[in-house]
Image: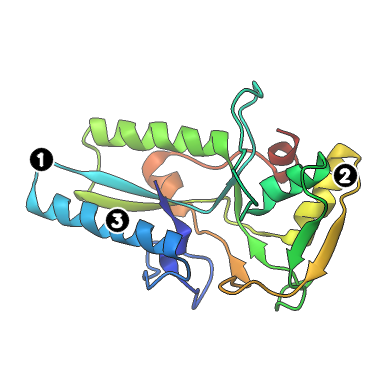
Amino acid sequence: SSSATVYGTPFSLPFSKKSKTQRPFSPYGNTKKIAEEIIEDLTKTSNNFSAISLRYFNPIGAHKSGLIGELPTGIPNNLMPYITQTAIGLREKLMVYGNDYPTKDGTPIRDYIHVEDLADAHVKALTRLLNKNQETNFEVINLGTGKGFSVMEVIKTFEEVTQQKLNYEITQRRPGDVPKLYADAKLAEEKLNWKAERTLDEMIKS
C-alpha cells in the first residue's frame, strides 16, 4: 500500500510508470518511498520474494454497508473527512487552503478514488502475485481514475448530492500542497484488468 506522494512535486502530469520518484513533500510520503525501496531491495536479493507496490491517489468513500468508513482522530488532513465532519457539526467550518493556484477555480486538484475500487485492485494484484503473472519481482502500479477534481468541485458536488450547504472559508495556502495531482492508470488496466468504476457522486454518497 504505497502512495502517489512518492512522486513528490510533479514536473509533468499525469503521473505514469515513467514518472520518477523524488523526495516527497511530506514525512508521510517519505515513509512510503523508503518502504518501497526496502521492499524493492528485498526482491533483488531473493528470487523467492515478489511484490507489487500500489500507489494510491486520494481514497475516499465508505463500504456500501455503512459499517466501514473513514473517521480520523484529531483534525483531518484530508478533504473528505473534513467535509463530512463539518457537515455533521463536529467541525465549525471547513478551511479551504488557498484559491490562487493555477487551476480552473484556483483550488488544488486531486484524483479521488473510491475505497471499494481500491479493494478490488488489491484482490487483483494479489491474484497476479499468487499466479506468478508478474513480469518482474517488483512492479509499481498507479491506482486512480486518471482525472482530477478541484476542492471547490468536491464541495459543490457534496452540497448537490446531500442537499446540505457547507460552512467553509477560503484561507491561506498550506505549505507542501501542490496545485495538481492525478494518475495515469493505464498500467492497472493492462496488468490487472482493473479500472476505477465509481463516480465522484457515488464516492460522496457513500
Q: Earlier in the sequence, mark 2 or mark 3?
A: 3
First in sequence, mark 1 or 2: give its number.
1
Residue 175 visible in the snapshot: yes
Q: Quadrant of the C terminus?
A: top right
Q: Which mark is residue 160?
A: 2
Horizontal and vertical percent position of residue 203: 68, 39
Relative to residue 149, is residue 160 drawn left or right?
A: right
Q: Could one spot residue 16 in this view of the protein?
A: no
Q: Report the residue at 59% width, 72% height from top.
A: 178
Above or below — where is 64 with respect to 201?
above
What number of labels is visible? 3
> Are the residues flagged by discs 1 and 2 in contact, CB closer than 8 Å?
no
Provide the residue designation for mark 1. Answer: 48
Q: Earlier in the sequence, mark 3 or mark 1?
A: 3
> Any mark on residue 36, and which?
3
Looking at this view, name the residue that lies furthest to the front: 74
Q: Quadrant of residue 33?
A: bottom left
As helix, strand or loop, the secondary structure at mark 1 comes to: loop
- Real-space Cα separation, disc 3 to disc 1, in angstroms: 17 Å
Q: Quadrant of residue 88?
A: top right
Give the residue type at disc 2: Glu
